[in-house]
Structures are given as C-alpha cells and as structure tokens.
Amino acid sequence: MQLSEFLARFHIQQPSNDVGFPIQMRNIAKQSAVLVPLVNVSGEIHLLLCKRPNYLKHHPGQICFPGGKLEDTDANLLATALRETCEEIGVEINNQHVIGDMDSYWTLTGFEIKPYIALLPEKPNLVLATNEVASAFYLPLSQLIDQENWQDIQFTRQFSAYTLTGFQTEYGLLWGATAQIIRNLIKHLN
C-alpha cells in the first residue's frame, strides 16, 4: 500500500466502539499504550513489530508493538507509548509523526491497551533493549490487509476456550492483542 493511499483511506474511516468486552472489565483494567509504527519502506507502508525474548515471564516470544504500562511520570497514554518506544527500540518519535489513535483494546489479562499510530518517513535506526526486545522486523501492510493470510487460532485460558485470528510471520505467530489492534487498523482502511 502506497503512503498516499494509506493517508486517504485512514482519515475517511471512523473508529469502531465495538471492543467485545464487558463494561466491568473496562473499569478495572490496568492502563497501557502501544505505538503502531507505520514506516515508509521504498514507497510501501510497513508495520514495525517487535518480538519479545523467550525467557520473559509474561508473553515470552510473542510479537508485539513497542509499548507498556502507564507510569506516574507519564503525562498521558500517548506519553507512555512514546516513552516505551524510545526505551524498547531506541527510536524517539515526536508528536508530528503521530497521526492518530484507535479505540482501546481490553485483554483477557486485565489490560486496557490504547494504540497510537505514527507514520515514519523512513526506516529508523533501531537500538533494541535486549532485556525487552529480542528482535524487530517490518511487515508490509499489504500482506496484513489480505484476509487470506490470516488464520483462526484456538487456545484455552483458565478452562475457557477462545478463538482468535493470527498471522504467521517468519518470526513466529502474530496473534492476541497485537493481531486485534492490526485488524482494527485494517477496518479503518476498508
């Protein structure tokens, strides 16, 4: 997808309020934020994603966006997303690169994740915090838009069965909150 096409389509769509979680969960969720970095790579939009180290206690080896929990020193959730991006991948994003946000996503583990979209004109120089990020990679947005590339994933958590949608990458399966945030972004474009 070309940059001009993305910008035209992104601004047309309005965010959806359908998040699929009960209101009680929304009131007790721990606040967090992620940055969804869209990067211009040779005229095509790519998503910049991270893979967590396998030795981590929470979400080991999972594919994610840079982000984390709201801290007392953060002015707001956008500040959280920008701080975490700088800490995790060494990229300082200024507000002029942030082109919008999307509806929050509530996780089964009790987090409210607020996604912010940033548009970067070129690949940034990455400096990974290896205690949080094992690797970082780019996925073409056009591959993610193609529904044929997605598959249903079944899993069990606390004796309940769930079906989510995932996307296989060379770095592993992209699923869970990250996949749902990407799918919400794609809804903005269709």
Image (cartoon, grey):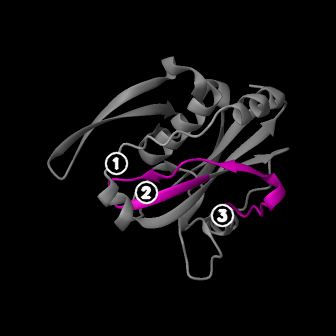
Q: Quadrant of residue 83?
A: bottom right
Q: Amino acid at mark 1?
A: Phe
Q: Nearer the viewer, residue 47 or 181?
A: 181
Identified at 65% across, 32% down, the residue is: 13
Tell which tag, 3 or 2, sits nearer the viewer. Answer: 3
In the picture, measured across the screen, residue 66 lies left or right of residue 160, that is right
Q: Is mark 1 in CB contact (under 8 Å) with mark 3?
A: no
Identify the residue under disc 3. Answer: 78
Q: Amino acid at mark 3?
A: Leu
Q: CA distance from mark 3 to mark 2?
A: 28 Å
Tell which tag, 1 or 3, sits nearer the viewer. Answer: 1
| Disc 1 crowd, CA 10 A, few/some/many (<14, 14-19, 20+) | few
Identify the residue under disc 2. Answer: 54
Instruction: Give percent across and percent down for residue 62.
Output: 45, 50
In the picture, measured across the screen, residue 20 lies left or right of residue 93, that is left
Determine the secondary structure under disc 1. loop
**Up-down relation of residue 21 to residue 70 (above or below):** above
Q: How many marks?
A: 3
Looking at marks 3 and 2 on the same chain, the residue that comes earlier in the sequence is marked by 2
Identified at 63% across, 63% down, the residue is: 81
Of the numbered discs in the image, which one, if any, rests on residue 21? 1
Quarter of the image that includes the C terminus: top right
Looking at marks 1 and 3 on the same chain, the residue that comes earlier in the sequence is marked by 1
Instruction: Give percent across and percent down for residue 173.
Output: 45, 38
Determine the secondary structure under disc 3. helix
Q: CA distance from mark 1 to mark 3?
A: 23 Å
Q: Amino acid at mark 2?
A: Asn
Instruction: Give percent across and percent down for residue 157.
Output: 22, 49
- Residue range highlighted in magenta: 88-115
In the picture, measured across the screen, residue 126 lies left or right of residue 144, that is right
Residue 158 in view in this figure: yes
